[in-house]
Amino acid sequence: MLLAYILVLCSNIVVFANETGEQHNLGESLPIWSVLPFVGMLLSIAVFPLVKPEWWEHHMLKVVIFWSLVFLVPFGVVFGSEMLIFNILEIVLLDYLPFIILLFGLFVVAGGIILRGTLIGTPKVNIVLLLIGTILASWVGTTGASMLLIRPVIRANQWREKKTHIIVFFIFLVSNIGGCLTPVGDPPLFLGFLRGIPFFWTLKLAPMFLLNTVILLTVLYFIDHYYYKKELASGKSPRDVMDDGPKKPLRVEGLHNLIFMGMIIGAVILNGVLPNFAAFADQVTGEIHGVHIFEGVVVGYNSILQMVMILTAALLSMKTTKKIIRSDNCFTWVSIKEVATLFIGIFITMIPALALLKANGSSLGVTNPLEFFWATGALSSFLDNAPTYLVFLTTAGSLGMAKGLATAVGTVSVKVLMAISAGAVFMGANTYIGNAPNFMVRSIAEENKIVMPSFFGYMLWSLCFLIPLFLIDTLIFFR
């Protein structure tokens, strides 16, 4: 059955490629249904953990390999081995490897910091913790803030029976919306900074940030207060799961890991800044200097430096942090292993979708802020929000706007740029795969015996709470 499917896929792509005569341009050569392996990958993530959880746990890698081959085999047959090797190396070495190393570094370093003392997860405490994480996200990144705060939130609510809603709103706020105020907060905004958008320009999103944060925290408070009262009425108490004894003052151990967190953030910033120097890039052509792996695939010295710095920070964190801290933090490698496995499949099968978007983004008919907000957001919910942001930023720059902010891709009106930025950052919260920390937070929560919604179950939460919020954003800011 699989062989028949691949043969049909090959024959159809051959016909299409011959008709276009543009095999070198994937976006123009690939038909729309070439995204089917990506859809299959997403459906596998959504369905298998729900219907066959134990099977999925042991065969996850096999499913990833299956869908990757469903795309790669016919692609290699039609476009040849060189094009196949080029695209695999490009997506793995230039996109996936820096992505997973950054996630790994933040995961390791944050796992070496622990908040000790008596912290009881009441509605007020939960609001304060999520507010701190949301504010931190713009300055240490959504991934960094998520990894720092998720374990204290889980421990504080260990005694609670109903806590899924807390983690879901944590993903909404800390893992996504909180990252909108600086280019460090989320990768799409950093790409904008590299293309001429001033570093502090993103503070123009502060009114949206405040509105969304206040609304979501208010909604969370009422939901959490409802469950909190029910649990107290049923006789459940924090002392049911916490040690007896006097209340202990809060204190933080492993604070030296903040130095390593700073190393990681510095590495990310350096990666973007170093190409401005002749040693790292040709200042005329913009060509990056680096290690030539394959024709057209160059791993830049700036990217290599970033990965080395991050791995060094992770190694130093492991060597200098007491084992008892990681043990008390319930630190294991399960969640990072799951994310690394699933996202290699997502990155590979996503190649056609990104190529199609890049080739056809300017022909989508998107011209005003409302359209840019929803188009960027809808695609960022399922695709990597960084290249999606870049496609629509380039599209906006090509519209020939008379007034606005001058960027490397053209002049873009302030409202349109706000719409693209907000869509990419905010709507990454719509699905588990919309932003990297979403899946990581879910995995850590499940590792700590918290029942999390399925893929579609989580989307139901976002439909109920985020989509109405984004409609409010549209009416106030982008109408």
Image (spheres, helix red, strand yellow):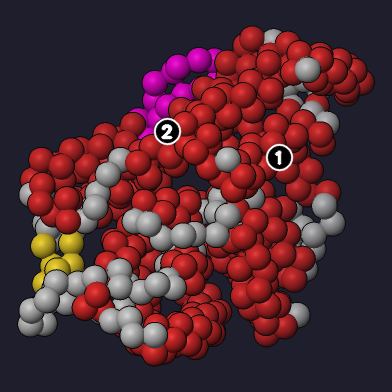
Pointer 1: residues within 10 angstroms few (<14), some, or many (20+)? some
129 versus 187 height, above or below: below
- Hey, which residue is sitting farthest front in the picture? 235
Q: Is residue 22 magenta?
A: no
Pointer 2: residues within 10 angstroms few (<14), some, or many (20+)? some
Across and down, in percent, residue 332 comes to: 27, 44
350 versus 453 height, above or below: above
Q: Can see residue 14?
A: no
Across and down, in percent, residue 132 comes to: 33, 76
Give whichever of 174, 194 is nearer the camera: 174
90 versus 212 height, above or below: above
Question: Which of pointers 1 and 2 indicates the residue nearer the eye?
Answer: 1
Tell me which corner region of the image, top left, top right, bottom left or bottom right, holds residue 255.
bottom left
The kind of residue tagged 1 is: Val
Element carrying mark 1:
helix
Tell me which corner region of the image, top left, top right, bottom left or bottom right, holds residue 245.
bottom left
Give whichever of 218, 2 is nearer the camera: 2
Measuring 52% from the left and 80% from the top, which residue is drawn there?
216
Q: Is residue 302 magenta?
A: yes
Q: Which residue is mark 2?
A: 97
437 on left or right of 285: left
- Give the mark, 1 or 2, whose residue is nearer the N terminus: 1
The kind of residue tagged 2 is: Leu
Give whichever of 366, 251 is nearer the camera: 251
Measuring 77% from the left and 31% from the top, which residue is drawn there?
34
Element carrying mark 2:
helix
Q: On residue 39, which mark appears?
A: 1
The N terminus sits in image quarter: top right
